[in-house]
């Protein structure tokens, strides 16, 4: 499908435009007041796997402290874009980028960017819960220890704080020394969120975090996103459109590597501007 | 592109609404004929038909709610279902207003009613409802806007009735006073039908554009201005 440069300009300007206007949010989202400041900015940002351009010249600002959902059919580049934000794609030998991707004014792909520090600032949770085969305590303490925290009391405080933030504390406080692999799938995923929060990131990248979970565990993760809204910049890739509309403030729609539409979620799901978006979200794709 | 079952379902709901609008318009036409002839006997038949309209309205609402709960539509699909729900409600109210018209027939005589142009008012109201539904079916923005503009003509005729009543009532005897008041009510019922048609047209505009056009800029000023006449 051909997407003109003009269309890209108009769609990516949506976030910038809307950030200037007063944003009316439903009561449960009124805590988000800080929005409007770009946290991650993509300028003509492309990601290639060899000759294949998986993400094509994206221009967009991810707004600080908002939840942004990324939707699109399989293979559209949404996960690639997400993984590009904390350079997870660096592990793929044929992968390279063009254009710029800035975070807090610093080039994510800059020559002197420290990837370890970058990933401390930009945490990630994956599709399948992946706790380390260690105790619950050690899972959470792993990151802070790596970054030099040695004091036992400080670590204990960090573990409790992170587990509380991830709404898991009450369920595991009496068995912190038990192996994390003994937790249920939903608990394991919240543990992974807690592990990410333990190193005090600014940005959370969630790559289909509930696709392997049952509805009850999914609801807990969605509630957790609601709790974290306004404290972190959150990007969530999801195939579940209802989930995107429930949890996010803004939605990006990718199709064949192009960012087709980027708009406030309530607008995109009630009155999308682009016919391709309309066809996708209403299930009219052939 | 082949339609999916979910979109066929939306078409079915749209068709049910159009069928309901036919029933409502038919009943309204019967009510206007009864008013013309001051025919008390038609009242029971019109009330019976209104009972069927009410039942159809409830059924359609239930179907729409089930569709919303099970299919969770978004974008255009969501707007279509919301519009059907709202139009459904307006049609039911139009049905009630037609019944109100015939309920007042025993209180007036045909010679008295003849001094007011209720048949023309009724014809305009009916045309507005027909056109608003047609605009829904054809997704016709211009036709919907035309309906919104037609409302002014009906409002002006209602204001004309009001003036006539307010003048006539001053020199009227007891019997005539009642007939003047009843005539004003009938005029009001027909004018309200026009308002519902206008609402339907605006709901269609929302369905097409995604923008809510009710209470647009200047509508309050227009209302105040019309009251000065």
Image (cartoon, rainbow, N blue to C red):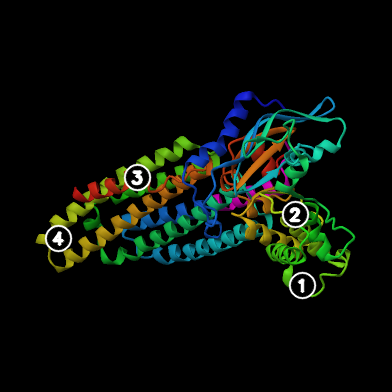
Same chain for the residues at labels 3 and 1, yes or no? no
Give the left or right position of residue B215, taking residue B74 as reference: left
Reading the image, the residue beneath label 3 is B151
Q: Chain of mark 2?
A: A
Q: Is residue B16 magenta?
A: yes
Mark 4 or mark 3: name the one nearer the start of the chain.
Answer: 3
Q: Farthest front residue?
A: A151
Taking the spot 86% from the left edge, 35% from the top edge, the residue there is: A92
Q: Chain of mark 4?
A: B
Snapshot quadrant of residue A213: bottom right
Same chain for the residues at labels 1 and 4, yes or no? no
Q: Secondary structure at mark 2?
A: helix
User: Is residue A206 something one can see in this rendering?
Assistant: no
Reading the image, the residue beneath label 2 is A196
What is the CA distance from the residue labelled 1 to the residue labelled 4?
A: 83 Å
Q: Which residues are magenta?
A: B1-19
User: Is residue B57 something one can see in this rendering?
Assistant: yes
What is the CA distance from the residue labelled 2 to the residue labelled 3?
A: 61 Å
């Amino acid at each position: 499908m051909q997407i003109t440069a003009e269309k890209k300009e108009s769609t990516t300007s949506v976030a910038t435009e809307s950030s200037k206007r007063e944003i009316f949010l439903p009561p449960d989202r009124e805590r988000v007041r800080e929005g409007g400041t770009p946290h991650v900015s993509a300028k003509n940002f492309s990601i290639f796997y060899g000759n294949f351009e998986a993400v094509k010249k994206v221009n967009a600002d991810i707004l600080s402290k908002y939840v942004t959902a990324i939707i699109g059919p399989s293979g559209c580049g949404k996960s690639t874009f997400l993984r590009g934000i904390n350079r997870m794609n660096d592990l793929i030998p044929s992968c390279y980028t063009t254009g710029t991707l800035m975070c807090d004014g610093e080039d994510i792909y800059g020559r002197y960017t420290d990837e370890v520090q970058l990933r401390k600032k930009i945490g990630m949770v994956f599709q399948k819960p992946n706790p380390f085969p260690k105790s619950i305590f050690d899972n959470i303490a792993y990151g802070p220890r790596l970054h030099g925290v040695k004091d036992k009391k400080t670590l204990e405080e960090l573990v409790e704080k992170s587990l509380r933030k991830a709404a898991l504390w009450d369920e595991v406080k009496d068995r912190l020394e038990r192996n994390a692999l003994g937790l249920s799938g939903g608990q394991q995923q919240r543990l992974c969120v807690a592990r990410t929060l333990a190193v005090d990131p600014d940005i959370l990248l969630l790559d289909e975090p509930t696709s392997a979970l049952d509805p009850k565990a999914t609801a807990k993760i969605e509630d957790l996103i609601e709790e974290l809204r306004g404290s972190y910049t959150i990007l969530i890739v999801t195939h579940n459109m209802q989930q995107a509309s429930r949890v996010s403030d803004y939605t990006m729609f990718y199709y064949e590597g192009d960012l087709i539409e980027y708009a406030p979620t309530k607008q995109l799901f009630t009155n999308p501007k682009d016919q391709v978006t309309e066809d996708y979200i209403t299930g009219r794709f052939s | 592109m082949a339609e999916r079952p979910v979109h066929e379902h939306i078409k079915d709901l749209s068709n049910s609404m159009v069928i309901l609008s036919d029933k409502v318009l038919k009943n309204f036409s019967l009510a206007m004929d009864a008013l013309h002839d001051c025919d008390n006997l038609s009242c029971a038949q019109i009330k019976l038909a209104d009972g069927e309209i009410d039942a159809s309205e409830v059924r359609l609402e239930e179907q729409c709610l089930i569709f919303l709960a099970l299919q969770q539509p978004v974008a255009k699909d969501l707007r279509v279902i919301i519009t059907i729900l709202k139009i459904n409600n307006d049609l039911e109210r139009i049905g009630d207003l037609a019944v109100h018209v015939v309920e007042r027939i025993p209180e007036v005589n045909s010679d008295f009613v003849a001094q007011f142009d209720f048949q023309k008012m009724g014809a305009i109201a009916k045309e507005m409802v027909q056109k608003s539904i047609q605009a829904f079916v054809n997704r016709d923005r211009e036709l919907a806007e035309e309906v919104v503009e037609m409302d002014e003509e009906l409002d002006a005729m209602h204001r004309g009735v009001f003036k006539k009543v307010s003048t006539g009532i001053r020199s009227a005897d007891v019997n005539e006073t009642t007939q003047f008041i009843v005539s004003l009510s009938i005029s009001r019922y027909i004018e309200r039908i026009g308002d519902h048609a206008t609402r339907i047209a605006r709901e269609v505009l929302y369905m097409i554009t995604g923008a809510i056009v009710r209470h647009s800029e200047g509508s309050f000023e227009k209302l105040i201005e019309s009251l000065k006449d």
